Image (cartoon, rainbow, N blue to C red):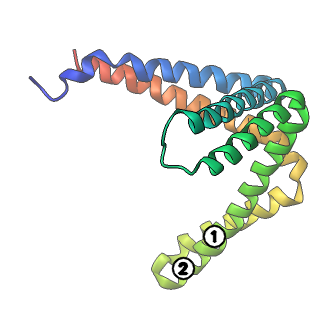
Amino acid sequence: MEKTEPLKNIWWLPFFRGIASVVLGALLVFSPQITTIVLIQFLGIYWLVLGVVSIIEIFVGDTGIAKGWLLIRGILEIIAGLVILYQPLSSAVAIVVALVTFFGIWALVLGVVNIAQTFIGGGPASFLLGILDIIIGLAIFYSLTGAVIALPIVIGILAIVSGLSLIFYSFNLRSRLQ
């Protein structure tokens, strides 16, 4: 049997992942506010379920995690889930602002690291990339509101590109295996 034989039956998995990614991306691009709120609500449900499961783990058996920590984790997950479910708009804004702030800090740090790499063999491309990273980081902080508004759309575009890549990959995989 060929090494590729097992792949014959799963070419459709990346295809459907690609379709899901394109659909999610399109929703984020064409309806970013509503889609973001819905995704945040799913996050709230997820955390709520995780919290309940963490508390159940206390009584079910030894998971290797101290029961006190499981209780604290479970309570925090339940609280986070409930806050998100009862305040979806505020939660969506807070989470997106936190992500954008993280990306801004990340870009600034990455810029400094890339510039530092210039002096240890990174060359001029590393320096230019570092400057670009710093410009992006500063732009994020200069217009935090704009970055917050743009984030779901940028993620949507990336999801569409990723989804299309997965779809093309699945067709390529299928044709190679026939």
User: Does residue 129 appear in the picture of this structure?
Assistant: yes
Which numbered disc flags the more N-terminal residue, 1 or 2? 2
Q: Residues within 10 Å of mark 1 (few under 14, many from 20)?
A: many
- Residue most extreme to the bottom: 119
Q: At 39% from the left edge and 27% from the top edge, which residue is drawn?
A: 169
Return the x and y of residue 122 as percentages of the image width and height: 49, 76
Q: At 25% from the left edge and 18% from the top edge, which residue is drawn?
A: 8
Q: At 60% from the left edge and 23% from the top edge, which residue is drawn?
A: 22
Residue matched to label 2: 118
Q: Nearer the viewer, residue 147 or 3?
A: 3
Return the x and y of residue 59 as percentages of the image width and height: 58, 34
User: Does residue 176 appear in the picture of this structure?
Assistant: no
Residue matched to label 1: 130
Image quadrant where residue 24 sits: top right
Q: Nearer the viewer, residue 4 or 64?
A: 64
Q: Nearer the viewer, residue 65 or 7?
A: 65
In the image, taking residue 52 as reference, residue 146 lies left or right, namely right
The kind of residue tagged 1 is Gly
In the image, taking residue 161 as reference, residue 145 lies left or right, namely right
The kind of residue tagged 2 is Thr
